[in-house]
Image (cartoon, rainbow, N blue to C red):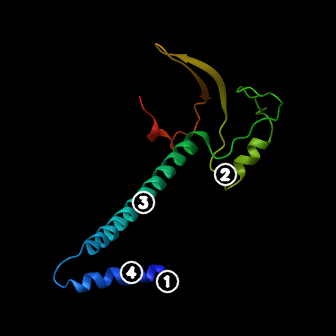
Amino acid sequence: MNIYRFIAQRTNQSARQKEGRVSFSDTVSRVAVVSIAIGLALIMIAFCTLDGFKESVKNRIFSFGGHILISKISSNQSLEETPLDTRRKFLDIYRQVPSIKHVQLYVQKAGVIKAKEEVLGVIFKGIGQDYHTADFVENMRE
């Protein structure tokens, strides 16, 4: 005989034998079922919330950084990349591709910000006047 079936039958029989009174095992079973139901509901809510936050963070990152970044190939391992020659025709070719929404030029420079007691490394991103700000303007703070 299966051990799980045996325990379930014994629990059920003891509750039936006491007709009219609620047995301890019946109370424990109800508490267990309710606890599992509440736990599953909370896990589902947590996963839905996490998925929403993940989408929000992903959209914020892509709104400022873009989906694809093209840089010049170099053996330089610093944060300051070698600039691309913007006079080349590849920029015009990319701008004509219908699936590309926007092509943007930018420059990066590493720097240090010093507060009262902290020193933080940062990367400054320089943008031109034609920078496409419509996607990330909702994330800007003053």
Q: Identify the residue at image location x=79%, y=35%.
A: 72
- Dot 2 or dot 3: first in sequence order is 3
Which-is-in-front pick, marks 4 and 2?
Answer: 4
Instruction: Identify the amino acid type marked 3.
Output: Ile
According to the picture, the residue beneath numbered tag 4 turns out to be: 8
Q: Judge the density around disc 4: few (<14), some (14-19), many (≥20) Cα neighbours within 10 Å.
A: few
Secondary element type, mark 3: helix
Q: Distance between the Cα atoms at labels 4 and 1?
A: 10 Å
Residue at the far left in the pictured view: 20
> x, y (%) of residue 98?
68, 56
Residue that carries the numbered disc 3 in the rendered image: 43
Q: Secondary structure at mark 2?
A: loop
Q: Identity of the amino acid at label 4?
A: Ala
Quadrant in the picture for residue 10: bottom left
- Distance from disc 2 to disc 1, alpha carbons, whole Å, reads 63 Å
Identify which residue is drawn at 42% across, 56% down.
Answer: 46
Q: Hey, what amino acid is under mark 2?
A: Ile
Residue 22 is left or right of residue 114, and the answer is left
Q: Position of residue 18 (x, y in %)?
A: 21, 83
| Mark 1 neighbour class, 10 Å CA radius: few under 14, some 14 to 19, many 20 or more | few
| Nearest to the observer: residue 38 or residue 89 | 38
Q: Quadrant of the C terminus?
A: top left
- Please determine whether, in this image, residue 73 is positioned above or below residue 29: above
Q: Which residue is mark 1?
A: 2
Q: CA distance from mark 2 to mark 3?
A: 39 Å
Asked whether disc 3 touches disc 1, contact meaning CB atoms under 8 Å apart, the reply is: no
Describe the element under mark 4 as helix, strand or loop: helix
Q: Earlier in the sequence, mark 3 or mark 1?
A: 1
Crowding at dot 3, Cα within 10 Å, few <14 / some 14-19 / many 20+, comes out as few
Q: Which of disc 2 and disc 4 is earlier in sequence? A: 4
Which residue is farthest top? 116
Circles 4 and 1, Cβ within 8 Å, touching? The answer is: no
